[in-house]
Amino acid sequence: MASFDAALRRPHRRATLGIAVVAALSSSLAVACGSPPPATSRPSANPTASSGGMYSVTSYGARGDGQSDNTTAFGDAIQAAEAAGGGVVYVPAGKYLFNASKTGTGGSIVIDGTAPITLEGAGRDQTRLIEGKANKGLLGVHIDHSIVEDLTLDTQTFSGGAALFVQANDTSLLNTTILGGPNHFAIYYAGPKGAKPLAPSYNTGNVVNNLILNELDCNDGFSWSFQQNSSITNVAHTGSRLALYVDQSTTVTDYRYTPGAQQCGARNGFWLTPPADNITITNFTSSGEGGKVGIIGAKGVGKVAKNVTVRGLTMTASSGYTLTIGDVSNLLLTDSNLGHNNIVIDAQAIAEGTVSHCTYGQMVRSGAPSAQVHLAVVS
């Protein structure tokens, strides 16, 4: 798969503070003598359970002033938590800039090793991490069971690279805002190294919940690639599209999509690329295109999406957009209101399933004349 920065392009909690003065003094002396800062507690209204200690990045020299480079401080805090067997790396309110030209990795912040880490802010309206180098990635997650929550990841301000790159299992992205730049996927869940459509392998168990995504990319603003037993829930997305790329047993629920300011044609809402199996999309609302199901380039002829359910799709534009159905078997499109927008059948081999209790303009045939199209329409 692509490196953290070279994103693949395709069409497509806490204890209450109450530390005795003598304890604080001892801690200061320990730091002065060169020992690493201890895990610290911090206040919060919504504690998160964690099996490890708490490591505030400010104890390692981080400054949320919007000017200082925090690359080393965050790396030291993560390394300390990792060495202790995992824990919460806490980022207090502030604007934390990352502008180191060379880090040896694709991203300024990398969660790597063997123990799960929680990277947690004070709230997405209070804690912002900002990549200051053009085309450089911000955060990479490579440890299973890691959590990123309650902060904003910003690669939009300085045209950085991917805001979030995940190549791990059973991770969670919670209560987060992501601001993506124009040159890279804002969010890239890449799947295991070496995964390919002809020989797919999968990361499993990844979860996204309560996300605000605003990005300027012209391809896949949100790339969910080679994911299995995964879920995306409660997303407000402005930008290009959600790319569901060769996934299995994946659910997308309560997704609100608005085309972004970029004028580059990537207004598809979602793009479900085969081979894929057991995909359920529920309550997807789009003010652009409805989406593309089973569409792949000419070299992908023969790949088919299977067992796809789209329920409660709403297209808010009165007309001029489409929902496109490509190569798919056992499709159920149900309880959806497309307004006067059309359904376009653009299969190369097969489009088979049911369109049930839907409102739309017309169903238009395109694609290969030899394709087998068997779509039952139920009023």
Image (spheres, rainbow, N blue to C red):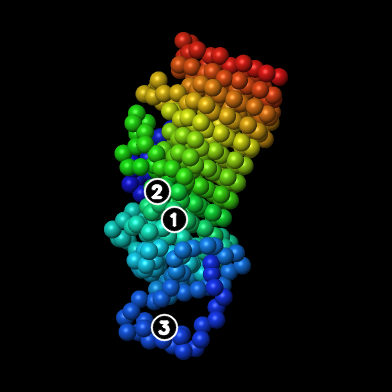
For the point 46% across and 69% down, which residue is it? 54
Q: Quadrant of the C terminus?
A: top right
Q: Label 3, on which residue?
A: 27
Q: Quadrant of the N terminus?
A: top left
Please, what is the three-letter code of the amino acid marked with disc 1? Ser
Marks 1/2 in contact by CB < 8 Å: the verdict is: yes
Please give left or right for residue 119 compared with residue 197 in the image: right
Label 3 secondary element: helix
Of labels 1 and 3, earlier in sequence is 3
Of labels 2 and 3, earlier in sequence is 3
Residue 146, label in figure:
1
> Observer-nearest residue: 190 or 183?
190
- Residue 340: % across, % down: 68, 25
Query: For the residues marked 1 and 2, what is the alpha-carbon distance in whole angstroms?
Result: 8 Å
Please, what is the three-letter code of the amino acid marked with disc 2? Ala
Label 1 secondary element: loop
Q: Label 2, on which residue?
A: 168
Please, what is the three-letter code of the amino acid marked with disc 3? Ser
For the point 37% across and 52% down, which residue is it? 142
Q: Is residue 187 above or below residue 296?
A: below
Query: For the residues marked 2 and 3, what is the alpha-carbon distance in whole angstroms?
Result: 35 Å
Q: Residues within 10 Å of mark 2 (few under 14, many from 20)?
A: many
Return the residue found at the far left: 104
Query: For the residues marked 1 and 3, what is the alpha-carbon distance in whole angstroms?
Result: 28 Å
